[in-house]
Amino acid sequence: MVMGDKGGGTEAQQYVWGGAIPLQIHLHDSEVTTLPPPPPALILAPRIGYLPLLVPQIKPFFSSSLPPGVDTVWFEYKGLPLKWYIPTGVLFDLLCAEPERPWNLTIHFRGYPGNILTPCESEDSIKWSFINALKEAAYIINGNCKNIMNMSQPDQAELWRSVLNGQLEVYLRVSSKLKLDIVGDDFSLKLNSSTSKSNQGVNDLDATGTTRTGRVPVRLYIRTIDEDTDDLEDAPAIGSWEKVSYINRPVEVHSEGKCFTLNDALKVLLPELFTEASSTNAHTSGAEVEGGQRSDGDSSRSPGETGAASNEHSQLPSDGAEIKLVRIQGIKPQLEIPFSWVVNNLMNPDHYLHICVYVKVLEPITI
């Protein structure tokens, strides 16, 4: 995946599509067959991309040092095998409590951990995982995924190439045919038409952040931090994916003349963390995944089957928990920002809004 044309879209969308993480890739010691060992590879990884797509750029750095055998490539961070179907930027936001630049990852060309990760055999595996996520999002938004299923082969290929090459303008043109508009964003319209009032705060724009009815596909990643950890910089590394709750929980928003904020959305998504009963004008969809865990890269299921999936990691924070950090696209957004703006500007190309939440807990409870 390469950095491409950033034409088209909002300024925020251009930043998202142009965002990249500097990586320092080390070959695992067990696979080094030469002395001295090869130096690490330094590359930029697009936030909206996927780690296996970087292998063609990385392998030349290490090919002369590899042992004989067939490549089965995977990445790890501090001993944790990285799930290839999670966007690179989401992995970074979730696993690095304090941003680490460059991000030091280890690459393996042998010994694939099939008990932890599902196979990623080629670029096609990533493409079909992406298309399947798009189907799931369409099912949430429209109640069916006909527009995705009926895409022409040229459009499907062009859509995927736009993601590979970071071409936002091409992506917007092709994806507009899928009719996956989620929520209206009057907040951005107000900002664009009110430059003379640039000092006006978010809270002063309450009436302009209203949205029409919409169902928003959300992937929520909850990382729990021990109660003894006061500084996120001191948070221990995640040693197992069992330490992360990975939830699909759509949000249904109804317009009632009131600004529905990111904070309101979090109350809907994580009612366990708010002591007051939510009085917002939104609720989780009846088609939500109850503590839903998407199985690793399973692109063979229909969206309906996905909606009925159970959570592999069923721990959610206890009532004594508190949110320490919310990250979306590397940003720590103000919770008062209109949710419609967040959705329309910060969602990934798969039409999901990926939210990473760090939660400080007294004691997790199992549901």
Image (spheres, rainbow, N blue to C red):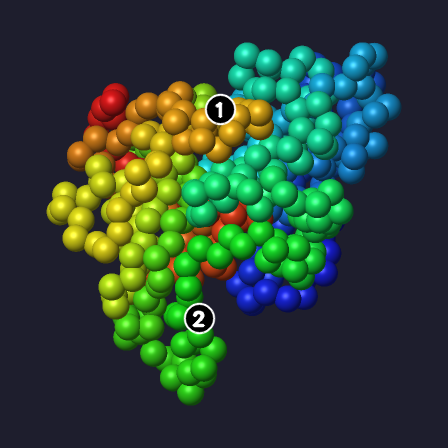
Residue 364 vertical placement versus 193 (above, below): above
The amino acid marked with disc number 1 is Ser
All told, the count of numbered labels is 2
Residue at 19 percent of width and 44 percent of height: 274
The relative height of residue 157 versus residue 225 in the rendered view (above or below) is: below
Residue named by callout 2 = 188
SS class of the residue under badge 1? loop
Query: Residue 108, position in %: x, y?
Result: 68, 22
Q: Is residue 281 visible?
A: yes
Give 69 or 263, whichever is nearer the viewer.
Answer: 263
Q: Residue 242 has which mark? A: none
Nearer the observer, 179 or 340: 179
Q: Is residue 214 left or right of residue 70?
A: left
Quadrant location of the C terminus in the rendered image: top left
- Based on the displayed image, in which of its 4 quarters is residue 195 positioned? bottom left
| Callout 2 amino acid | Ser
For disc 1, the marked residue is 295
Q: Which of marks 1 and 2 is nearer the N terminus?
A: 2
The quadrant in which the N terminus is found is top right
- Residue 309 vertical position relative to residue 329 in the rendered view, above or below: above
The location of residue 96, given as percent across then percent down, is 48, 39
- The residue nearer to you, when weighing 138 against 104, is 138
Kindly identify the residue that appears in the image at 29 percent across and 57 percent down. Answer: 254
Say which element carries label 2: helix
Q: How far apart are marks 1 and 2 (CA)?
A: 35 Å
